[in-house]
Amino acid sequence: MLPISRTQATTLSFFHLTVFEAMMRLKSVTQAADE
């Protein structure tokens, strides 16, 4: 595993959180549309 700086790690984790949140919202919106 390559050593990465703290800034890169923080950006990466933040990006992951944002993508995860967007996917969850999209999922709930899709479910709401199905009902």
Image: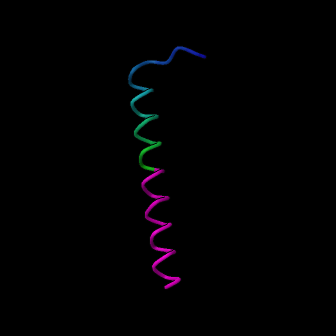
Residue 10, above or below 18? above
Quarter holding the N terminus is top right
Residue drawn at x 50%, y 66% is 27
Residue placed furthest toward the right: 1
Q: Quadrant of residue 29?
A: bottom left
Place of residue 2 in the rendered image (x, y in percent of width and height, measured from the top left) = 58, 16
Place of residue 14 in the rendered image (x, y in percent of width and height, measured from the top left) = 40, 39
Residue placed furthest toward the top: 3
Residue placed furthest toward the bottom: 35
Is residue 25 found inside the magenta-colored segment of the image? yes
Residue drawn at x 42%, y 45% is 17
Residue 16, above or below 7? below
Magenta-drawn stretch, dominant element (helix, strand or loop): helix
Residue drawn at x 47%, y 51% is 20
Tell me which segment is drawn in magenta: 19-35
Q: How is the image coloured?
A: rainbow
Count of number-bearing discs: 0
Place of residue 21 in the rendered image (x, y in percent of width and height, measured from the top left) = 42, 54
Place of residue 9 in the rendered image (x, y in percent of width and height, measured from the top left) = 44, 27
Residue 30, above or below 16? below
Relative to 2, 28 lies left or right:
left
Is residue 1 found inside the magenta-colored segment of the image? no
